[in-house]
Image (cartoon, rainbow, N blue to C red):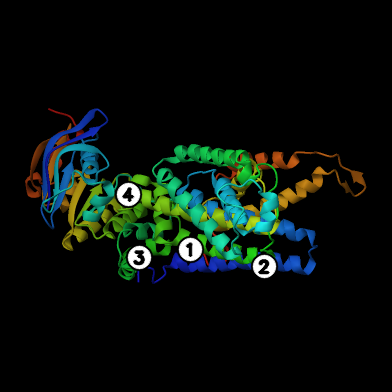
Amino acid sequence: MLEISQLKVFHGVIEAVHGIDVSVSEGQCVSLLGPNGAGKTSTLSAITGTAKSTGSIRLLGEDMTRLSIEERCRKGIAISPEGRRIFSNLTVRDNMLMGGAMRRDRAALLSEIGEWFERFPILGERAGQMAGTLSGGEQQMLAIARALLSRPRILLLDEPSLGLAPQIVAKIFEIIRELKSRGITILLVEQNAAAAIGVSDKVYILNNGRISRQGAAAEFGDGSDLMDELTGVHS
Amino acid sequence: MRFLPLNSAQRQGLLGSAMLSLLILAIVGAYYLWGESYQARMLYAVFVNLLVVVGLQVFTGNANITSFSHAAFMGIAAYVAAICVTPIAMKAISLPDAPWGLNAFELSALSAALLALLITGLLGLATGLFMARLTGVGVTIVSIAILVIVHSIFLYRTDIFKGNQALFGIPKIFDLPQITALVIVAIFIARAFRESAVGLKLRASADDEVGARAMGVDVFKVRLIAWVVGTLFFATAGIAYAFYLGTISARPFYFNFVFLTVSMLILGGLRSVTGAVFGTLMISMGLELVRWLETGPVISGIKFPEVLGLSGLLLGVVIVAVMAFLPRGIMGNREIEDFVKRKR
């Protein structure tokens, strides 16, 4: 479904990712793990079009590299960005509406928003509140729901567990597992290796802008032998 | 249908607009019951300002980009409407040297107003094509340039605009009922815009432009729409101004007026239509009070000194104080109906 090859990502003159290949098949959850600064978020930025890149990014065989950010969204790429980045001055409900900003079927969109409010009652209770007043976990749920309201082909999740309490992290991964069981294709960027491997079909380890290891999730066990690679310490 | 069903924010918008309209009607009602005739002129001026400030909310408020060119668009519409509607016989006296046969035709009030809206709207579109591409400070600077350029044209093409002299002889077409109706319609439109799909996308892009684009928002398009809609509000205000006063000159369409209206919006809170209305009413009342103090009144036997220029000082103080202590204005993100609906 998503085929990335020879991807290099640039921030100004600095090359953050040095030519990686990543592929995600329909219905799969694929993890991109690695220490801080490995180039995980850069890779996602290249996919959404917010960072400059060379190489090829294909979604369902169609080349994305020349498309603008908004055109890529219309082709079916949705992201729950690092640090949530919900619209803090919009209400929770307006944030949800923004998720479906390019959809024409308003009635269906409104009823889907209603379904999300049933799934996350806390968001439903706060529908009219400014999203900036939500807790981190609530904002993460909102960011995921908002991304899915665009009915994407592929969902990119950038560190959904970052800065959240352990029981909230467990809840977020429960949601990811459920999304996967509904057949949603996911590319997950995480530092929490054990939890990410637990929900994934395939794992890539990214280090210093290069893929140092890749394979089926089962090969990685519980991720405990990855400590060296993920902390960036090379023995 | 793309616009139906209304979402709950849009239903609340209708309620809020109705409440603000009642407030406007109450003010007009109070004038008819207890007001003195000289206050009609004052109230009319407040309502013209209200049209402008509500129009400012459409672009500046929702996009969170400050712009100063509104007085120019208002002036253009006022002059177009005035020149078109003034009878030929009158123009022979007031505009004897006008080129291109400007003093050789006259239009009905309705056609004059529509032509003024059309011309101002087209200029709004032309400038908007640049504005919508620029980022925050760029818009502000270019908007000042537009204001200065248009004002210079008003001043130096005296054959058409009379410069600082009055262009007189405009028939009086509007009175309090008409401007009241316009203000109410403007409030409903501004609020409907804020809660519309375009308004929502614009507010989201003000919060996080890249984030909004990642949700498929064409930021250029929504900014352009808001800019042109705002321009039409300013044009309406300009037409209403010319249709009441009987004479216009270039001076009111410049920096003083720009700062007055911008401080009204800032005080009320630029994110909210209610803020635009409250800010306008509060500064207008405050200025009346200050104008009275300026003259050195006698209060309970004590003669206060005459302090000329106090009103200008007050505006400056309001802008600085609000920026410092209430950066989001009185209303912040709230609208009037938030006061009455149950907290959820």
Q: Chain of mark 3?
A: A
Give x and y (percent) for residue B225: 42, 54
The numbered mark, 1 or 4, whose residue comes first in the sequence reads 1
Observer-nearest residue: A25 or B162?
Answer: B162
Residue denoted by label 4: B213
Q: Do tags 1 and 4 sit on the same chain?
A: yes
Q: Is residue B253 above or below residue A12?
A: below
Q: Secondary structure at mark 1?
A: helix
Observer-nearest residue: B219 or A113?
Answer: B219
Between label 3 and label 2, give the one nearer the viewer.
2
Residue denoted by label 1: B192
Neighbourhood count class around disc 1 (C-alpha, 10 Å): few under 14, some 14–19, many 20 upward = some
Report which quarter residue B4 is drawn in: bottom left
The numbered mark, 2 or 1, whose residue comes first in the sequence reads 2
State yes or no: discs 3 and 2 in contact (Cβ < 8 Å). Answer: no
Q: Which mark is residue B177?
A: 2
What amino acid is labelled 4 in the image? Arg
Report whether residue A93 is seen. yes
| Alpha carbons under labels 3 and 4: distance apart | 25 Å
Q: Chain of mark 2?
A: B
Name the side, left or right, on which B200 lies relative to A167.
right
Residue denoted by label 3: A117
State yes or no: discs 2 and 4 in contact (Cβ < 8 Å). Answer: no
| Alpha carbons under labels 2 and 4: distance apart | 43 Å
Between label 1 and label 3, give the one nearer the viewer.
1
Name the side, left or right, on which B29 lies relative to A6.
right
Q: Chain of mark 1?
A: B
